[in-house]
Structures are given as structure tokens and as C-alpha cells.
Image (cartoon, helix red, strand yellow):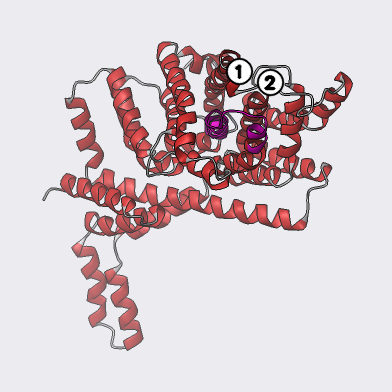
Amino acid sequence: MIDAHVALMMLGIFIILVFLGFPVAFTLMALGIGFGYYAYFDAGRMWRAFDRLAEDSETLTSVITWFEGAFNNRIFDLFINQTYTVMSNEVLTAVPLFLFMGYIVERANIVNRLFSTLNIAARNIPGSLGVAALITCALFATATGIVGAVVTLMGMLALPAMLKARYDKSFASGIICAGGTLGILIPPSIMLIVYAAASGVSIVRLYAGALLPGLTLVGLYLLYVMGRAMLQPKAAPRPTSDEIPEVPLPKVLWMLATSFFPLAFLILAVLGSILFGLATPTEAASIGALGGMLLAAAYRALTFDRLRESVYLTVRTSAMVCWLFVGSYTFSSVFSYLGGEHVIAEFVGGLDLTPLQFLLLAQLIIFLLGWPLEWSEIIIIFVPIFLPLLPLFDIDPLFFGILVALNLQTSFLTPPMAMSAYYLKGVAPSGILLTDIFKGIMPFLFMVIVSMVLMYAFPQIVFHLPDLFYGAR
């Protein structure tokens, strides 16, 4: 068996083990070290260590020498170096800080106040409750970047309010599920930080490139919600004065000033400092973390228990991302050393695909991977397989990354493994069935596909802001 076949077997075993439910990070490390021992095996190097065993008669020293010989393989050097590389990666330092900002904002009850305010401010807009829920989801998802947290919290907060206002249950469910996934795409997105670390693309250019596609998708969602409310009033009835009371304009402005604007200002300050070069992503994330704490303190919600829980969740999620990187780097290094990347590149090159056909094939594979895997696993493990192929088709990795971020929206929204639907089902009233949620998701899934088509047709949606801020590619 040639080494390239070993590499493909290694990949096949990994996919099987993942589908069987084995932990992804540790599966990557185990396969990387196991197959790496074979790939980097050097009999001469090992036996040189064993030769010293004959010179040593002391039992303890002999045992140590034996272990030295058995583990005298470059894969262990590689594993240690990859671990150090991940832990010293400056881009990844921003991840725990952004996570902490999101967790502290989530636990400060800011979202409840925000939704109530937007609900009153938008009462005269068609589908006002849906619009308020969608904007709240977008802001909250942007602040946290954690799909499960946004969908779960908004499912407990906004869904009962929409159902009480006689909204169609499928329509209301779809709004929550779609809005909750926006944090994957809209900066400051943690997913884009991870993609930048995996691909080597500048994070500031990624953030600039993702801004217009993110706003485009939010705009399409809002157009659909308001359009359906106008064309099908029974799906989103106008609120009565008993449900949403009339509030004088000065009071509305005051409510917005104390709920919407502080969170929006925090997000814009973090994003703006990155885009305009005033701070590195790590420095901006530090500002965001401090701002989240100050915001929670201003709302008198910064308790020791909430702070401790936020720190714990931050450490847990950060550790998961870092160990995934360690496992992925080790796995991909061995996979490449055995010739796996070369085989895949030859296979794809032999298909004689056009750039559009390659993009469609790559996005289809990522779309299917989104059913069993989390976005972090797809970005860290599988996207690097496609990155070396991009120059063959003259595809900019920045464009590819934004397209992947859009695609991963569909992985959370597509049955039968639409995770956002399961998050919502876990907190929804008993009358809401999974079929109702899936039905409500479908129009929003169509909007994601429309936005991807727009990106294909008008690439300047992605490239305009990066070229404007930082110069042409």
C-alpha cells in the first residue's frame, strides 16, 4: 500500500469515527499521532536509542531508555510544536475575549430589555414583533456568536410573545431560528477569526468583506417578514393597544438610548476599531470584554455568580477550539506528508471543473458536512483541504471564506439536522412541533441561497469594503 492510500484510509477512518460519535478533537490527535508514527518511522533513529540499553544495567534507567527508543519518532516533536504554535497564535487570542463579551452580555438580561424596546419602537411596521425579534437576534447573535445561546434565549423570550400576538407558529419559529444563526457571518464573528487562523487570510479584510453580505442577508430576512405580514396579515396580525401600548416619542427615544444604543455602540466600537486600524482584533476583543462587563454593571446585573459562569463557559469553549486546532494541525500535517493533499488536488484537477463548478462542489460538500458537524469542526478540519485547491481555480480565499460563512447558515437551517430547530424545540411550548419549525425555516433558507447567488453574480459585495479600506488585492 502506497503512502497516499494510507492518507486516504486515515481520512476515511476519521469520518467513520466522527459519525460514530467519537470526540472530534481527540480523534484527530489519536489518528494524527498513530498514522504519524508510521509516516515518520525511522528504524535507525529508534535502534540507536535501543543500542544504549545494552550499555545500561540499572533497571530504572533501562526502562527509561526503552521508552526513549520506542517514542523516538518525529511525530511527537511535531505534536508538541503544533500545540505550541496554536497556543501562541495571536489571532486566536481574540476568541476567548469575544466569547467572554458574549457570555457576559447574555447573562445580564440586556436582551429582554432590548426586545421590549424594539417591540414598542416598531409597533407601526408590518410584522412589528417579527421585525423586533429579528433585529434583536441579529444584535445578540453578533455580540455572542453562539447560535445555541441566541436561539434558546430568544425562543424563551420572543416566541411566546409572538404566539400570544396570534402569529403563525411556523412563521414565528422560522424568524427565531434564522435570526439566531446570523452571528456566524456578521462581524465580529468568531467563525471568521477561526477561518483567518486556518487560512492565513487577514482578519480585518475578512471582517470588512463579511459586512455587506451580512447586512444583505439581514435585509432579505426583514423584507420577507414585512412582505409576508402585508400579503398575509393572518400570519402576523397588527398588535392591538392592549398588546403593545402607545408610548410617547420622547419615552421611546429614552428606551432606545438605554437598551438598543449601548449594545449597538459596543459592537460598532469593537468592529470599527478593527476595520479602521485603531486596534488589533485582540485589542478590540479586550475592549469588547471590558465593555460587556461595564454594560452589565450599568444594568446592575454583574454578580459574582454570573461572572464566574461566564468565565467558566469561556474557558470551556476556548479549550474546545484550541484542542480542535491542535488535532487538526497534527492530522493535516501527517495527511499532507503522506501525499493525501496531492491525491485530492490531482483528482479535482482531473475533473476539468470550471471555477463556478468547483465552488458549487465545495459548497455542496460543506453543506452536507454541516449536518453531523459543528461549524468549528468544518472550518478547522475540512476547509483546509479545499484551501490549496483555490489557486488552481483562481479563487480568492477571502471570497471563499465569506461564501463558507453564508453556507454554514444553511447547515443550521436545513432538515433533518437543522440544529437551530432542535435548540428552539427544546424551549418551545408543547404545541410547537418540529415539522412546524422546519416549515417556518424554509423561506429563510431560500433567502440564504439568494444571498449566495448574489455573491456569485456580484463579487464586489464581498470585495468593495476590503478594497476601499485596505487597497486592491
Q: Is residue 104 found inside the magenta-colored segment of the image?
A: no
In the displayed structure image, the side of residue 364 where residue 352 appears, left or right: left
The residue range painted magenta reads: 160-184
In the displayed structure image, the side of residue 116 where residue 421 appears, left or right: left
Question: Which secondary structure, mark 2?
Answer: loop
* Three-letter code for the amino acid on which mark 1 is drawn: Pro
Question: Which secondary structure, mark 1?
Answer: helix
Instruction: Tell me the residue at 54%/40% (across/down).
Output: 147
* Residue 382 occupies quadrant: top left
CB atoms at circles 1 and 2 under 8 Å apart? Answer: yes
- Position of residue 194 relative to residue 405, above or below, is below
Task: Specify whether residue 151 is in view.
Answer: yes
Name the foreground residue: 195 vs 304: 304
Q: Which mark is residue 115?
A: none
In the displayed structure image, the side of residue 133 where residue 17 appears, left or right: left
Question: Badge 2 is on which residue?
Answer: 238
Q: Residues within 10 Å of mark 1 (few under 14, many from 20)?
A: some
Task: Specify whether residue 200 is in view.
Answer: no
Q: Is residue 172 found inside the magenta-colored segment of the image?
A: yes
Q: Position of residue 284 (x, y in %)?
A: 66, 36
Instruction: Tell me the residue at 48%/48% (across/down).
Output: 86
Name the foreground residue: 252 vs 145: 252
In the displayed structure image, the side of residue 54 where residue 227 appears, left or right: right
Instruction: Tell me the residue at 75%/32% (across/down).
Output: 116
Question: Badge 1 is on which residue?
Answer: 233
